[in-house]
Amino acid sequence: MDKFVINGGEKLCGKLQAQGAKNAVLPLLAASVLTDEQVKIRGVPQIRDVENMLHILTEVGCTVKRQKDCAVIDSSSAVSHEIPTRLTKELRSSVFMLGSVLTRFHRAKISYPGGCDIGLRPIDLHLSGLKRLGVKIVEKDGYIHCEAQRLQGADILLDFPSVGATENIILAAVKAEGLTVIRNAAKEPEIVDLQHFLNAMGANVRGAGGGTIVIEGVKRLHGVDYTAMGDRIEVGTYLVATAICGGEIETSGVPAENLAALLHKLRENGCKIHTKNDKILLRSDGRLTSVDLVETMPFPGFPTDLQAQYAALCCTARGSTLIMENLFETRYRYAAELKRMGADITVRGRAALIRGVEKLHGACVMASDLRGGAALVVAALNAEGQTTVTDIAYIDRGYADLEGKFRRLGAKIKRVRI
Ligand code: EPZ
C-alpha cells in the first residue's frame, strides 16, 4: 500500500511526453490474439491495467515479452477460450477479449465483469451486438458462455455510442463472413487507433472516428509492429494541474483535436494555449475564472475521464460551475475528499455545483477510483500545506510514474510505502 505526500503551492514548468494511451493499448492487446504471428506494440505504458491485460494474454496461452514501453505478443500457442475470472474482476476492460477470443476460437467464456467504482457498467450493448453477428450467448452462474461456429457480418445499431461495445463488435467482425456496419458507433480517437492497428494486420475497417463503421471480413490477419497513440487523458490531467498551480507546460504526443473540449474550457478559464501538430503549450497565472456549465459527453464532447480533474480546478476558480456527469452514475466519489480540503461542492445525482474558494488546504484524503484519485493529486498540488493521498493503487492503474513526472515539473510530491 503506497501513499503520496504532497506539499502544495509550487508552480509547474516544463515539458511532458505523453505515455501510450491506456484506452488504446488495452483493445490493441486484446486484438493481438487475432493472429498467430508475432505482434509488437510500442508505447505500452507501465501501468497496472496493462500488466493485468498482459496476464490475461498469458493465461489464455500467449507468450508475452515486456521490454520497457514495448510488448511483444506471440499468440500462436494461445489455447484457452476462457478469460480468467480473477483478472476480469481486476480489469473490467477484459470484456474486450470477448470479441477477439470469439474470432480466434469461435467460443469464449468470461465471468460477468461486475460494476466498478464509477458505475454499473452494463455490457448489454456488447452482447446484443455479438448476437447480431451470430454468437449464441448463455449467461449462467455468473458466467457468459459464447459459441459462434460462423461469425456472420450484420448491420448493428447501438442504442448508445459505447466505446467498449464498438471495439468488441469490431474485434468480432474483422474475420466474420461478409460486411458489418456499426451505426451510432463511438467516435473516440482510441477507436481510430484500433482501426489503424487492425488494418495494418490486413483487416478492412473503415469509418472509425465517425458514427458509422464498416468492416469487411477477411480470411487472415498477420503480425504487425505498431506504435499506440498518446494518452489524451494523461495529458489533460497535467494541463489541468498546470492551469490550477500556475506556470507553463508543453506537452507532446497528443494532438489538440483529441482534447478540443478541454482546451476550450481552459481558455475560457483564462489559460493561454497555443497548439501545433502534437504539441500543446499552456500558460496560466493560476488565478482562474470559472465557466458556468460543463457537461460530459461521448467524444468529441467533454470527456468523462477528465471530469474529476476539472472539478478540482473549479474548486479555486472565481465563481461557480455546474458539472453534469452524463456517462456514469457514481463518478463524484472524490467530492467528499475535496470537501475535506475545504472545497465547496454540492452533489445531487448527476449534478455537482462547485463554488470557488480562495484556497484549498492540505488534508489526509483517499482515492476511490482512477480519475478521482488523480483529481485529489491535482487539487493537493495547489493546496496550502501538506496533503496525503492514500489508496494510490487506483492511480497506478492509469498513470505511469505520476510522481516522477510531476516532480520534474517542479511539484513537491513523493511516494511513501506504508
Ligand atoms: C471506456 O469505458 C473507457 N475505458 C472509460 O475510461 C471511459 O470513461 C468510457 O469509455 C467513456 O469514454 C476503456 O476504454 C478501457 P462505454 P467503456 O461503454 O467502454 C453505458 C478510464 O478512466 N453502457 O462508452 O466501459 C455505460 O453504463 C476509464 O480510463 C451500457 O449501457 O465505456 C456508460 O453509462 C473509465 N451498456 C456509457 O454507456 C453497454 O453495454 C459509457 O460506457 C456498455 C456501456
Image (tube, helix red, strand yellow):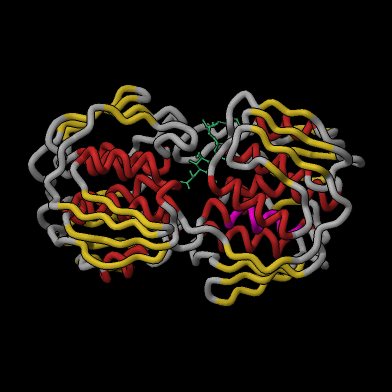
The part of the chain drawn in magenta is 25-33
Tell me residue 75's x, y (percent). 77, 65
Tell me residue 72's x, y (percent). 67, 71
Quadrant where the image shows the C terminus: bottom left
Tell me residue 147's x, y (percent). 85, 40
Image-based side of 208 in relation to 307, left or right: right
- Between 72 and 370, the one nearer to me in the picture: 72
Q: Quadrant of residue 288?
A: top left
- Between 209 and 407, the one nearer to me in the picture: 209
Instruction: Determine the residue located farthest toward the right in the rendered image.
Output: 149
Q: Is residue 301 above or below residue 270?
A: above
Residue 135 in view here: no
Image-based side of 173 in relation to 6, left or right: right
- Which residue occupies 58% across, 27% down? 160
Asked whether 27 falls inside the magenta stretch, the response is yes
- Which residue occupies 56% across, 38% down? 187
- Which residue occupies 54% across, 47% down? 189
- Which residue occupies 64% across, 65% down? 226
Instruction: Determine the residue located farthest toward the left in the rendered image.
Output: 358
Residue 374 in view here: yes
